[in-house]
Amino acid sequence: MTTVIKNGTVVTADLSWKADVLVDGGKIVEIGDNLSGDKELDATGCYVMPGGIDPHTHLEMPFMGTYSTDDFDSGTRAALAGGTTMVVDFALPSPGQGLLDALQMWDNKSTRAHCDYSFHMAVTWWGEQVFDEMKTVIETRGINTFKHFMAYKGALMVQDDEMFASFQRIGELGGIAMVHAENGDVVADLQARLLAEGNTGPEAHAYSRPPQVEGEAANRAIMIADMAGVPLYIVHVSCEEAHEAIRRALQQGKRVWGEPLIQHLTLDDSEYAHPDWDHAARRVMSPPFRNAKHQDSLWAGLQAGSLSVVATDHCAFTTEQKRYGVGDFTKIPNGTGGLEDRMPMLWTHGVETGRLTKEEFVAVTSTNIAKVLNCYPRKGAIRVGSDADIVVWDPAKTKTIAAASQVSAIDYNVFEGKEVKGLPRYTLTRGQVAVTDGVLTSEEGHGKFVEREGGTPTNTALSKWKDLTAPRPVKRSGIPASGV
Ligand code: DUC
Ligand code: ZN
Ligand code: ZN
Ligand code: ZN
């Protein structure tokens, strides 16, 4: 059965034009005028865009003594409701656990997905097993992105020597290193100091993670990546200090990508000053929300191209879970939701305000990340032969974001009360209509793992230090000729 999307304007990362789009067997088979199909979707007044790709989610993740509440079922339904048709989750080995073992756990959980998905692999410890299994992960599953936590001391954090060893291995295998950039030692020290001073509330979370801890770690990761000869992707860039490090690296010819989150772009640190404990705790995530100066920097980065992808880090905990941290802010599970709201919030605050063109919107919500992940143009494109992951976007449709009407399984929404203009009329996942005007008809298990090409075409020309192992011009040994 064929489906035709009629009378819309196709919007890609570089071009917009009026055309119908014909879908068959889950793929785009024709783009042109006056097309017909068995089933017709009316896109009059709408933009026909590649479905969003959220490159950063944590669905049903074991973390801080609990599990994030949105799983591959509710999480991918929330994604589709908001026009996102692919998510990339982090397979997270516990320290000492093998990569393949962790991957198996994520394979088991993800069978419930309603939209397509892929994984990044987290490196939470270093040893021969990790070294060996990295190759298998790339070669058998096409997972070429490996994330390192520079924070969460005593849990997920890796040391610099581990990171350097891991980065070199990833470089050798043609992959991409990723980091959560925060100096975990400094955070741990600040946390202890704040608690000792009686600062136990959620606002202290933000005090314990100032922009400097992020800027320092981003700079360090960039330098270590440079010495290891590996491209680097920095997740949830929230501040000017980290952004500045990325800009400098890019101008030096280093291959670095920066990923801001929709939360950091649109919510600021005044949220932590709210008199209600629950309100503030629900917004505890790492890095924390920042002030307007940092937000302006992130928006400027999207416009300038020094930041290339907007994600969510969707890691949703209920109010009850957040209350594990009553009396000790360091025990509040870190994370916020956003999967359902990323596209409408970015459209409203980016395109509607004139900060981004609609083509730039497509680039930062879909196309750019598909390229980084090596799954473009299968994903992230409206092209003949691409997967029919499509959002028919109605720029006139409005709503007020409310937990009461959300798909996510948690009991609040950090964007509660925000008006958005621009929402999906239809969301298609590999040709299947999953959303029609806010009504979900998606199917559990429809989502499939997206294998990616191992290696990356961009893994070249980055490092002045490529010859770290080359012969040195001078090798002196022994003692001075004149004696000691
Ligand atoms: N930050 C969060 O807020 N939650 C999940 C992990 C992370 O790095
Ligand atoms: Zn993180
Ligand atoms: Zn994360
Ligand atoms: Zn379901």
Image (cartoon, rainbow, N blue to C red):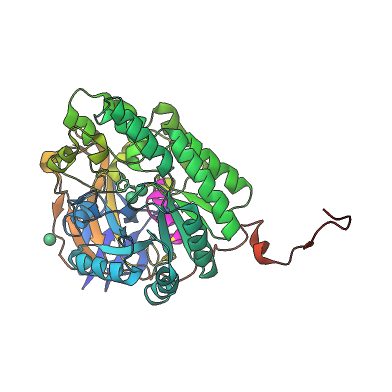
Percent from the top left, x then y, of residue 404?
A: 10, 40
Q: Position of residue 429 (x, y in %)?
A: 25, 63
Q: As rendered, which of 129 and 294 lies closer to the eye?
A: 129
Please say whether residue 484 is visible from this viewpoint. yes
* Magenta residues, start to end: 361-372
Q: Is residue 238 left or right of residue 160?
A: left
Q: Residue at x 45, y 38 (%)?
A: 213
- Residue sitting at x 63%, y 60%: 461
Is 107 situated above or below 87?
Answer: below
Q: Is residue 101 above or below residue 211?
A: below
Would residue 326 be counted in the magenta stretch?
no
Q: Nearer the viewer, residue 85 or 257?
A: 257
Left or right position of 63 against 125: left
Residue found at the far right of this picture: 482
State the predominant SS element of the stretch in magenta: helix
In the image, farthest residue toward the front: 484
Q: Residue furthest left?
A: 404
Q: Quadrant of residue 227?
A: bottom right
Q: Is residue 426 above or below residue 452?
A: above
Residue positioned 13% across, 52% down in the render? 439
Q: Would residue 417 be seen by someone viewing this image from the given angle?
A: no
Q: Quadrant of residue 337?
A: top left
Residue at screen point 37% across, 50% down: 365
Q: Position of residue 284 (x, y in %)?
A: 27, 37
